[in-house]
Structures are given as structure tokens and as C-alpha cells.
Amino acid sequence: MARVLVTGFEAFGGQAINPTALIVEQLQTLEVQQKMEQGGVVLQSCLLPVVQGDSVKSCIQAIEALKPDIVFMLGQASGRENISFEKVAINLDDFRIPDNAGNQPVDQPVVDKGPAAYFTQLPIKTLMLALKQQGVGADISYSAGTFVCNHLFYGISHYLMTQVHSNAQCDFIHVPLLPEQVAAEQQITGNRSLPSMPLEAMVEGIVHAIITAASFPSEQQVPAGTIN
């Protein structure tokens, strides 16, 4: 059985909800847990604060308790239309808005004297294709931003890479807004053309990604880059 940890975030930035919190809640249902067991997965999930430093600390506590083989961290990405598997975490905190504790670092490293970046070791193109085959929109992203999502992705990548006894692999996955979030987000940002995805599709995609990753498939050599 593969041990998998999935994390979500609380709401932030003026929004009342965060789809990742709802996904984490759905992952704890009996129906999903049964699917996980059938797929050879021991799944645990937790909710993290949208706070510099504290998000990484809380995730590390969950990792040390479960000792997972795979860690998937989920975050909300306004403006994206697909579930996005992040390729790279960069050693930079440059918060456009304050986090939920009021922190707003500018041009600071996530880890002092850490590497410039970490690339996920999970076969994310394989996961992307698996979701597409299920009819769930998915793509590869080459920027997790410079807010708490990237902060967590880099912090956990650094932690796992520097732990002598850990072979765990991790990735960050961004999901779109929920349909019910779009109107509120439009009022905050003024953007009138925001995409969204229903919660059911997000949960289906994440569940399929977890079960696929737990079989430890090889990476598919397919183009998934961007030109902008």
C-alpha cells in the first residue's frame, strides 16, 4: 500500500471559501476512502494555514506522522481553467498580497542559502494524461507563483530532499476557482472572464491523480511546454 498525504488550504485573499479545503473534505468520505483502498492507497489529508512558515511547519508535522511515499499539496489558482501539475518550486517569497497572518515578504528566499529551485520528481505528464483520459481538464504549469503556494512547494521539497531517511516525492497541484467563487472574485479583481471547474470534477481529477501516482508509473515523454 502506498501512503499518500494530500493537503489543502484555508480561504484567503477576501474569498469565503477555498476549493482545496472542500476537496480535502471530500477525500475523507467513505466513498473516496474505499476507492483509495481498492487502488492500493492509504490516504490522509489535512488543511494548512495560508501563512508564511506556518504552512510548511504544519505540513512537516503531517509528513512526520504519516511518513508518506507521496505528498500532494493543493492550492487555488484564479484564472486557470485546468487542474495544473506544477513542475518547479523557486526559492522566492514575493507576496503580492498579505497572507492570512499579515505577512508580506518582498524578494526574500523561502530557505536562506537554499538552491534556486527544485523540480518535482513525480511523473506529472503521466498524471496529466491520466486525467485527460478521464475527461478532466489538466495541464503542466511551470510557475507556482511567489505566494504561499510556491512557499509551501519549495519548503516541502527542500525538507524532503534534505532528510536522509526520506524517499518521499512531492508535487503541488493548482485547481481553478469554483463556479460559485467567480462572481466574488470578479468583484475583488475586476476580471470579467474567469474560468471555473465544478467541485465534482476537481475531486474526480485529484482522486485519479492519487491512484495513478500510487502505482509509481514512468514519465511520459510528451510535449507539454508553453511559449509564454
Image: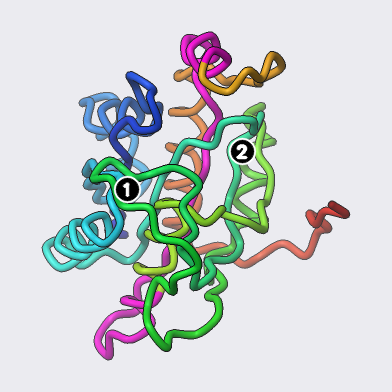
Q: Position of residue 203 (x, y in %)?
A: 43, 28
Q: Is residue 220 left or right of residue 8?
A: right
**Residue ID at (18%, 57%):** 58
Note whether residue 1 is visible.
Answer: no
Q: Quadrant of residue 220?
A: bottom right
- Residue at the image point whose x is 28% and y is 50% from the top: 51
For the point 53% across and 13% down, which residue is it?
A: 187
Which residue carries the number 1 mark?
Answer: 6
SS at circle 1? strand
Label drawn at residue 131: 2
Q: Residues in magenta? A: 158-187
Residue 76 x, y percent position in the rendering: 47, 36
Q: Secondary structure at mark 2?
A: helix
Tell which tag, 1 or 2, sits nearer the viewer.
Answer: 1
Label 2 crowd (10 A; few <14 / some 14-19 / many >=20)? many
Q: Nearer the viewer, residue 206 or 111?
A: 111
